[in-house]
Image (cartoon, grey):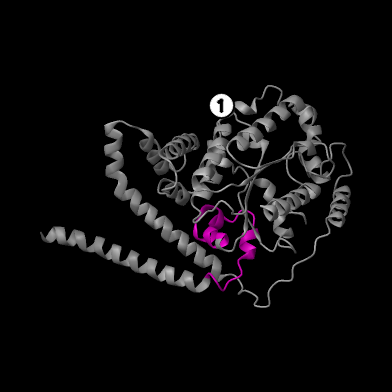
Amino acid sequence: MKKFKYFLIPIALIIIFSVALNKFLDKKYESLKDIKDISSVKHTYNNIVRDRGGLLKDKMKSDDDLMLLGSSELSAKIEQNPINFFPFEGADYDVSIYGRAHTQTLQHSAILSSTNNLKSKDKIAIIVSAQWFDFDPIKGTGSEFSVNFSEFQFYNFFHNDKLSNDSKRYFAERVGTLLEQSGEYIEEAVYAKLYVRDDILSKIILTMLKPYYNLKEYMLETKDKAQTIKTLEKLNKKNSDGKILKVINWGEEYNKAEGQGASKVTNNDLNLDDDYYNTYIKENYDEVKDKWKEKDLLSAPELEDYKFFLKVSNELGTKPLIILMPVNGLYYDHLGWTVEERIKFYGTLESIAKENGFDVLNLQNKEYEKYYLSDVMHLGWKGWLNINEEMYKYFNER
């Protein structure tokens, strides 16, 4: 009996300490969340606490931000990037970005599902890239997936009552496969694999492991609070004077974007930023000819992830604007991905979205427009400006 008592005392102390710590963190967060200026966090590319956590995201959601989901195009160091453009007169809301290189719709689904109080009228948009569907059947995409994986959002997904069992099973099966490919996050890979199995042994093992996984979830939630507080403590207080919103003259802005693009694209006929062309294209241009000739992006597993994102959004009761980002037509002609195949690809994505009740901004007709992209696949001066204008008009009218 004494041995049992000595075993219970440390456990009880840990529980008491954990509960006390969480109460302290909750109180600290409440004291900071409404007095700190978090605009810099909203606009910072690759902010791990924001992208992989929950509290910061919920705070930005409560500010009625435009929630912009994307990937590496969000890093564009140009004036027209939404993080530099919003807010403005007529669009007095800020923008918060989510995603970095190699983030795609499976992770965007997890980001959405870990956001509280989503509504159908929320301002949400997602930039969909063709490169997400460039699947290598030999390597797989596990390593790319794991660099952006969030343990916090992984467990949170399974506790969201709005999501169907079918969605949770798809998520578990897909994530389990990708983590298995990467060789990382073994505990989550095991959880996912056990979750989708229907045999009695797997269910028994998962039940036995539940206390451990519940404790890990609790610790991840505590970590998210601590990291959020640490982030907030570094920020300045809000300016009580308010912000003067700039007035946008779209014609002048397009002229400016044209001029900025022209100053950066001077040494090639592919409409690419000079530095990008010199670094990535100039020396290997001939070597990549017809590299995409045999690719079938519509057979990639990422197409199912795209459909899954739409399903999850519907189950959560929200309707993101689907923005289909173009590629550089001149370069992809050279790669062997023909105009006809691209029309089919973008048309398929558009049809799938519309059939599921989503509005779509299909920008494939911009593939050959000068200065729309800054390189072969990332939005440039006119591209980001055009998307800013389209998002502004869309969410104002809606």
Q: Amino acid at mark 1?
A: Ile
Count all numbered tags in the image, as a single digit: 1
Pointer 1: what residue? 138
Q: Secondary structure at mark 1?
A: loop
Q: Residue at position x 60%, y 49% from top?
A: 99
Q: Residue furthest bottom?
A: 241
Q: Residue at position x 39%, y 57% from top?
A: 219
Image side of residue 181 versus residue 397, left or right: left
Q: Where's residue 143, x and y in %?
A: 54, 38
Q: Which residues are magenta?
A: 33-61
Does residue 31 lie above or below 190 as drawn?
A: below
Q: Where's residue 71, x and y in %?
A: 64, 46
Q: Where's residue 308, x and y in %?
A: 53, 37
Residue 88 is a magenta residue = no
Q: Residue furthest left?
A: 1
Residue 51 is a magenta residue = yes
Examine the image and state in which quarter residue 237 appears.
bottom right
Examine the image and state in which quarter residue 248 appears.
bottom right
Residue 7 visible at all: yes
Q: Residue at position x 84%, y 59% from top?
A: 249
